[in-house]
Amino acid sequence: MQNRRETLKQSAVVAGLLATAGFPQFAYAAFNKAAFDAKSVQDSAKAAGATSIAESKDVTITGPDIAENGAVVPLGASTALAGVKHMMIMVEKNPSSLVAMFHVTDAVEANFSTRAKMGQSSDVYAVAIMNDGKALWAKKEVKVTLGGCGG
Amino acid sequence: MADPMRIRAQSSGDKATVRVLMSHEMESGQRKDASGKTVPAWFIQEVTAKHNGKDVFSAEWGPAVSKNPFLQFAVKGAKAGDKIAVTWKDNKGDTRTDEATVS
């Protein structure tokens, strides 16, 4: 007969297996909350698994020099390097700096664009986390005339 | 159920550029309503894409992605006629999938 402890242990194992198998209904559990809760660029890169952080010319961040409306700032992150695991877009002065994290697979290019909200003028970062745990970043300053977080 | 996404997938050479426009409020959790109460965060947390039924792309988003989010990525080896399906899931557990054909 199973006691409660064993049952709990087994369900944890099953949940773990399902999460790694990538069933959409369990993917929610894999959401990297630590990385999104981290306040600074360094912290969220670390939470995403980076061991060392360095600036790199091989990573590109695209965005406007001046954004009139902070609620929609088009930002893109790309790199031509091989062996990238994640690409992340971050806004330094937002309440939590991480905007989006893209998982790179063999089937997609490490080139993503989206639109972000920015509370105020800030540096924006593109961070590439490599398979070996190195984080490479590039930054660009974006001036915001009208903030997009409060109000 | 939320409004459908608008997906355009265009092949160029050996890859296809996929552009997606989703319809979502993307509440940041920072805003306050007229009575001074914080509006709870409500945002898309996970986006995945399939190319002919095979997982090719996934992303995690925070509340700092804009309202009615735009997303662009490129799928290698996708040709005209292939199917690209995009799924999002928000932090309330709502989900939506839409499919487009590469042109």
Image (cartoon, coloured by chain):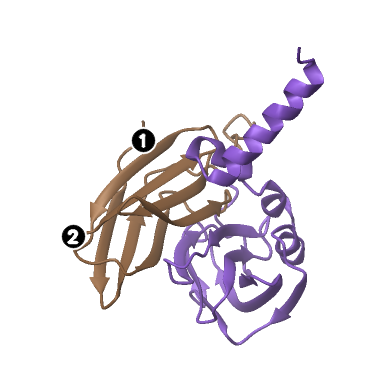
Chain colours: A purple, B brown
Residue projecting furthest to the bottom: A57
Chain letter of the residue carrying label 2: B
Q: Position of residue A41 (x, y in %)?
A: 71, 65
- When the figure is inspected, residue A36 is found, relative to residue A29, above or below; the finding is below
Q: Quadrant of residue A130?
A: bottom right
Amino acid carrying label 2: it is Gly
Q: Secondary structure at mark 2?
A: loop
Q: Residue at x 32, y 38 (%)?
A: B3
Q: Amino acid at mark 1?
A: Ala
Which is more toward the observer, A131 or A3? A3
User: What is the secondary structure assignment of the residue under circle 1?
Assistant: loop
Q: Earlier in the sequence, mark 2 or mark 1?
A: 1
Which residue corresponds to mark 1? B2
Q: Quadrant of the N terminus of chain B?
A: top left
Residue A70 is tagged as none
Q: Residue visible at 61% across and 72% down? A: A128
Apparent side of residue A56 relative to residue A53 in the rendered image (left or right): left
Q: Does any portion of residue A42 appear in the rendered image?
A: yes
- Is A127 situated left or right of B7 in this image? right
| A115 over B5 or under it: above or below | below
Q: Residue beneath label 2, please?
A: B81
Q: Is residue A96 left or right of residue A147?
A: right
Q: Is the C terminus of chain B in the top left, top right, bottom left or bottom right quadrant?
A: bottom left
Q: CA distance from mark 2 to mark 1?
A: 27 Å
The percent coordinates of residue B99 (x first, y second) are 28, 48
B80 or A36, which lies in front?
B80
